[in-house]
C-alpha cells in the first residue's frame, strides 16, 4: 500500500479514510438535495427555474444556496420549459398595396357591397395563432373567419 500511495502521491491516511468513506459528504448531500429538487421540479410540471425551486426548498426548511441548486440542476440537465416561443419577425420585400377603392367611405347602402378583413396575432403556449376575420360593411356582421398557426397567403375561411 505504501508504494501505491507514493506512486499516486496520496497520503496513507487519506487513502484509508477514502476506503472507509468512498463518497464525500458533499456528494451525499447533493444526492439528497437532488431528490428534493426533482420532486419540486415535477410538482411545478417542469416550469420552475432554480430560483423558484430554491424558494420551495427554503419553505420546507432546507438550508442551501441558490447557486448550489443551480449547479445541481445544471449537472443533471434539469431545465425549465418556457411558456411560449417568442415571435420572430421576418422582413421581406414589401407587398404591393391594394388600391384604395373605398376612399374612407365605410357606410354602405346594400349588403355584400364591400367586405373588409383584419388579421390578429394571439399568443398561446404553443406559439402564435393568427386569426383572420372578414366583415360585411353594410351589416357589420362576420362573413367568415380563419385561425391558423402560420400566416399564409391563401384564405380558406369558415362561413358563419
Image: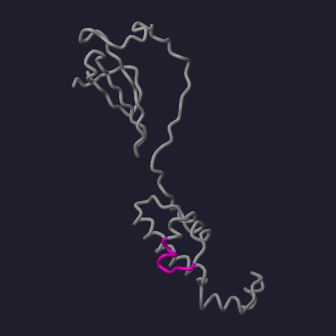
Tell me the residue at 50%/74% (across/down). 57
Task: Answer whether residue 57 is magenta in the image.
Answer: yes
Quarter that holds the C terminus:
top left
Is 36 on the left-hand or right-hand side of 2?
Answer: left
Residue 67 x, y percent position in the rendering = 62, 68
Q: Is residue 142 above or below residue 50?
A: above
Return the residue nearer the eye: 57 or 102. Answer: 102
Residue 46 x, y percent position in the rendering = 44, 59
Q: Is residue 27 above or below residue 41?
A: below
Q: Which residues are magenta?
A: 56-63
**Residue 157 occupies quadrant:** top left
Residue 147 x, y percent position in the rendering = 33, 31
Tell me the residue at 60%/73% (across/down). 65
Q: How was the colour assigned to the protein in this rendering?
A: one colour
Tell me the residue at 44%/69% (across/down). 40
Residue 8 x, y percent position in the rendering = 74, 81
Q: How many marks?
A: 0
Is 120 on the left-hand or right-hand side of 160?
Answer: right
Task: Answer whether residue 74 is magenta in the image.
Answer: no
Q: Is residue 17 above or below residue 100?
A: below
Tell me the residue at 32%/15% (across/down). 115
Return the residue nearer the eye: 25 or 127. Answer: 127
Quarter that holds the N terminus:
bottom right
Q: Is residue 48 above or below residue 2?
A: above
Furthest residue toward left? 160
Amino acid at each position: 500500500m505504501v508504494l501505491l500511495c507514493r506512486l499516486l502521491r496520496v497520503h496513507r491516511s487519506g487513502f484509508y479514510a477514502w476506503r472507509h468513506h468512498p463518497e464525500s459528504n458533499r456528494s451525499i448531500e447533493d444526492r439528497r438535495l437532488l431528490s428534493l429538487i426533482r420532486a419540486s421540479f415535477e410538482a411545478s410540471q417542469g416550469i420552475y427555474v432554480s430560483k423558484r425551486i430554491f424558494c420551495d426548498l427554503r419553505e420546507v426548511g432546507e438550508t442551501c444556496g441558490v447557486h448550489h441548486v443551480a449547479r445541481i440542476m445544471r449537472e443533471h440537465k434539469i431545465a425549465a420549459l418556457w411558456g411560449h416561443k417568442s415571435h420572430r419577425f421576418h422582413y421581406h420585400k414589401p407587398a404591393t398595396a391594394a388600391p384604395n377603392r373605398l376612399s374612407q367611405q365605410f357606410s354602405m347602402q346594400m349588403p355584400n357591397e364591400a367586405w373588409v378583413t383584419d388579421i390578429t396575432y394571439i399568443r398561446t403556449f404553443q406559439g402564435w395563432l393568427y386569426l383572420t376575420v372578414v366583415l360585411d360593411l353594410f351589416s357589420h356582421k362576420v362573413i367568415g373567419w380563419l385561425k391558423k398557426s402560420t400566416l399564409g397567403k391563401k384564405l380558406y375561411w369558415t362561413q358563419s
